[in-house]
Image (spheres, coloured by chain):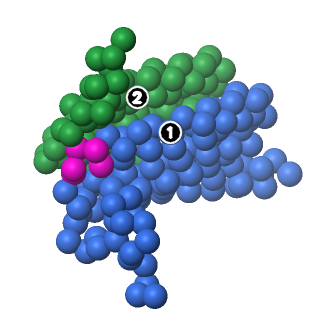
Chain colours: A blue, B green
């Protein structure tokens, strides 16, 4: 029982660290600000969930505050990313050249050539 | 953290690489939005790292520090994003509504 618990906990912590690595890689390599924020926000949110849950499973006395950390990150991180993307869009931040649909400018056009 | 050097190297190495990439993006980001995004993502990674440290030192108080750090990072991100949004051009309507008392 204890060994299975340790295996699950360390696997979750390692998975969270892997998601942090992917978030940093996306932030470094993506072409424009929108794709950078999309990659890094989702990956850091899931990585923090996984690390906090893994630590809570490894030591059950940490589980309550770990769930508190998860709820807090789930509430704040998407709001912060949405605000950053909105400020970048209002300042006309450059899009990468593969972007051809802007649904705020033209909501009825675009999509898959209907 | 765990007594096994392999698990320690994987966890700390991957988290450190993530923070290092964010720091690189902060240093060579072309605009201030990339720098703001890099700082926010680095803060979230540091919150997760403080959670790991609380397990490593077997101290329950580090969880409170992580929550407080996340709260301060959220406020910092919101303040800078609202400031950059207020610098945008073509916000005539907001200025007009601000002038009308």
Which residue, given by chain and number where applicable, does mark 1 sit on?
A79
Q: Position of residue B21 (x, y in %)?
A: 28, 49
Do the residues at pointers 1 and 2 share their chain? no
Q: Position of residue B29 (x, y in %)?
A: 17, 46
Image quarter hosting the C terminus of chain B: top left
Residue at the far right: name it: A1
> Considering depth in this image, is B86 or A50 the residue closer to the camera?
B86
Q: Quadrant of residue A56?
A: top right
Which residue, given by chain and number where applicable, does mark 2 sit on?
B78
Q: Position of residue A82 (x, y in %)?
A: 44, 44
Magenta highlight on residue B29: no
Give me the residue at 37% from left, 51% from top: A37
> Considering depth in this image, is A6 or B60 the residue closer to the camera?
B60
Find numbered disc 1 in the image and state the secondary structure of the residue it sits on.
helix
Q: Position of residue B76 (x, y in %)?
A: 38, 24
Give me the residue at 61% from left, 45% from top: A49
Image quarter hosting the N terminus of chain B: top right
> Considering depth in this image, is A49 or A18 the residue closer to the camera?
A49
Q: Is residue B94 left or right of residue B29?
A: right
Give me the residue at 25% from left, 35% from top: B91
Residue range of the region highlighted in magenta in the rendering = A89-93
Q: Are marks 1 and 2 in contact (CB under 8 Å)?
A: yes
Residue at the far bottom: name it: A114
Give me the residue at 48% from left, 54% from top: A43
Instruction: Please state the chain letter of the residue tagged with numbered disc 2 in the rendered image.
Output: B
Residue A35 visible somewhere in the drawing: no
Position above or below: B101 against A16 = above
- Mostly what secondary structure, the magenta segment? loop
């Amino acid at each position: 029982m204890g060994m299975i618990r340790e295996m699950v906990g360390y696997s979750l912590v390692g998975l969270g660290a892997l998601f942090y690595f992917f978030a940093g890689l996306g932030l470094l390599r993506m072409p424009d600000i929108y794709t950078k924020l999309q990659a890094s926000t989702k990956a850091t949110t899931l990585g923090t969930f996984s690390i906090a849950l893994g630590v809570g499973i490894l030591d059950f006395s940490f589980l309550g505050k770990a769930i508190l950390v998860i709820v807090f990150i789930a509430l704040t991180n998407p709001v912060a990313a949405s605000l950053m993307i909105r400020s970048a869009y209002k300042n006309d931040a450059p899009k990468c050249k593969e972007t051809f649909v802007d649904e705020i400018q033209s909501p009825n056009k675009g999509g898959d050539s209907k | 953290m765990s007594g096994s050097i392999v698990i320690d190297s994987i966890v700390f190495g991957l988290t450190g690489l993530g923070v290092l990439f964010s720091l690189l993006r902060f240093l060579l980001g072309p605009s201030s939005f990339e720098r703001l995004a890099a700082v926010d993502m680095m803060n979230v990674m540091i919150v997760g790292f403080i959670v790991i440290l609380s397990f490593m030192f077997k101290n329950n108080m580090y969880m409170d520090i992580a929550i407080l750090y996340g709260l301060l990072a959220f406020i910092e991100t919101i303040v800078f994003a609202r400031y950059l949004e207020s610098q945008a051009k073509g916000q005539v309507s907001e200025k007009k509504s601000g002038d009308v008392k």
